[in-house]
Amino acid sequence: MLLNFAHAFKDYGLDYWRIPDPLNLFQNTPVNPDGTFGASIEPESKAGDYVVFKALTDLIIGISACPQDMTSLCGYHITDIKAEIIPKW
């Protein structure tokens, strides 16, 4: 996936090494008592769940729905994602 982002961000002068690790909003990976990560399991999110961010500065974002349809990461099926930018709310 990072290669896709690197291609998309190329027009903005962002090289591959400058792309941070993704933030997986709906992935369900438990944190063990010792602080390590457990195995990812089916997400608890449901259709219609959402997250709202407020940008405090200009930014460039990349967004992708999870392409991992053969694992529990997405409940074994790919779903669409909707992104909406609301100016100055």
Image: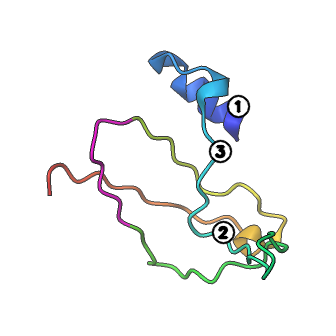
- To which quarter of the image does residue 16 belong? top right
Task: Give the mark nearest the N terminus, 1 or 2.
Answer: 1
Q: Are marks 1 and 2 in contact (CB under 8 Å)?
A: no
Find the magenta span and give its range: 52-59
Instruction: Label 2: state its secondary structure.
Output: loop
Residue projecting furthest to the left: 88
Q: Is residue 80 left or right of residue 87?
A: right
- Crowdedness near tag 1: few (<14), some (14–19) or many (≥20) residues, C-alpha within 10 Å: few
Q: Residue at 66% of width from left, 57% of height from top?
A: 66
Q: Residue at 22% of width from left, 54% of height from top?
A: 86
Task: Give the mark nearest the N terminus, 3 or 2.
Answer: 3
Please name the residue that numbered disc 3 is placed on: 21
Q: Is residue 63 left or right of residue 55?
A: right
The quadrant in which the C terminus is found is bottom left
The relative height of residue 70 versus residue 15 in the rendered view (above or below) is below
Q: Residue type at mark 1?
A: Leu
Q: Position of residue 74 (x, y in %)?
A: 71, 70
Q: CA distance from mark 3 to mark 2?
A: 14 Å
Please name the residue that numbered disc 2 is placed on: 27
- To which quarter of the image does residue 82 belong? bottom left
Q: Position of residue 75 (x, y in %)?
A: 73, 76
Q: Residue at 65% of width from left, 44% of height from top?
A: 21
Front residue (pair 28, 32): 32
Q: Position of residue 1 (x, y in %)?
A: 70, 41
Front residue (pair 46, 57): 57
Q: Position of residue 34 (x, y in %)?
A: 81, 77
Q: CA distance from mark 1 to mark 2?
A: 20 Å
Please name the residue that numbered disc 1 is placed on: 3
